[in-house]
Image (tube, rainbow, N blue to C red):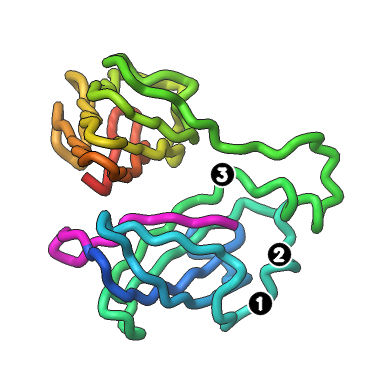
């Protein structure tokens, strides 16, 4: 199961080009439910603070990833990080796993689903409002433009996410409309400024009816 995250220190600064340690815990039922699987990873962040890893391939402490009964969810992924690369895991986040990779589900549930659900790359070159097609997909900004988070956008439910990318000199701006908060500030904005030949990554998650959090800018 692929996993990506932007790593920040406790002072909110990006942790770039560094070796960090992660503990991954899979909870069943709720965010503090039964610990059915636990593993650790040692990975390097890139120049944007991004790490990429495969859950299920780390050093196992609890359980067997291949035997998780994905049909008996919900499941929650808890991540703990030590930005110094040790075992002092002092940054923690918990996110509900809203979709399970088809191949994993089929192994344990005999799924009759005919195709896997995959994130879609959404080209983004013109300023517009958030849309249904953005939800749980990746916005690929290749020409500077602004995405506005409109008030009462009920199509996106709490916990759903959008991956954000600004490519090759493009600037992607995320703007909260009137009545919407971004990182706990009403009407706030966030900007992802890429440079030629590089990509800036970010992550947007809905936390309330009219509230979002964002990282990576």
Q: Nearer the viewer, residue 170 or 156?
A: 170
Disc 1 to disc 3: CB gap under 8 Å: no
**Mark 2, residue position:** 68
Disc 2 to disc 1: CB gap under 8 Å: yes
Residue 138 image offset from top left, x and y in percent = 44, 35
**Mark 1, residue position:** 63
User: Which quadrant is home to the N terminus?
Assistant: bottom right
Residue 130 image offset from top left, x and y in percent = 36, 21
Judge from the rendering whether residue 79 lies leftward or rightward of residue 104; answer left or right. Answer: left
Q: Badge 1: how crowded within 10 Å, few (<14), some, or many (20+)?
A: some
Q: Badge 2: how crowded within 10 Å, few (<14), some, or many (20+)?
A: some
- Counting residues from the start of the chain, the first of labels 2 and 1 encountered is 1
Residue 93 seen by the camera: yes
Q: Which residues are magenta?
A: 1-14
**Mark 3, residue position:** 98
User: Which quadrant is home to the C terminus?
Assistant: top left
């Amino acid at each position: 199961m692929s996993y990506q995250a932007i790593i920040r220190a406790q002072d909110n600064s990006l942790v770039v080009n560094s070796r960090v340690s992660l503990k991954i815990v899979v909870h069943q039922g709720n965010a503090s439910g039964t610990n059915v699987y636990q593993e650790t990873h040692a990975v390097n962040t890139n120049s944007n603070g991004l790490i990429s890893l495969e859950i299920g391939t780390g050093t196992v402490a609890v359980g067997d990833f291949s035997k998780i009964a994905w049909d008996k969810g919900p499941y929650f992924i808890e991540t703990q990080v030590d930005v110094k690369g040790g075992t002092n895991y002092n940054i923690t986040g918990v996110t509900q796993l809203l979709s399970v990779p088809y191949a994993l589900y089929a192994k344990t549930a005999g799924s009759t689903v005919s195709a896997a659900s995959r994130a879609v790359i959404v080209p983004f070159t013109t300023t517009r409002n958030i849309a249904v097609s953005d939800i749980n997909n990746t916005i690929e900004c290749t020409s500077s433009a602004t995405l506005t988070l409109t008030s009462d956008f009920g199509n996106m439910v709490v916990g759903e996410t959008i991956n954000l990318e600004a490519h090759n000199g493009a600037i992607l701006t995320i703007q909260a409309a009137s009545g919407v908060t971004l990182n706990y500030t009403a009407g706030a904005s966030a900007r992802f400024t890429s440079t030629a030949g590089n990509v800036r990554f970010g992550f947007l998650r809905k936390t309330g009816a009219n509230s979002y959090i964002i990282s990576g800018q």
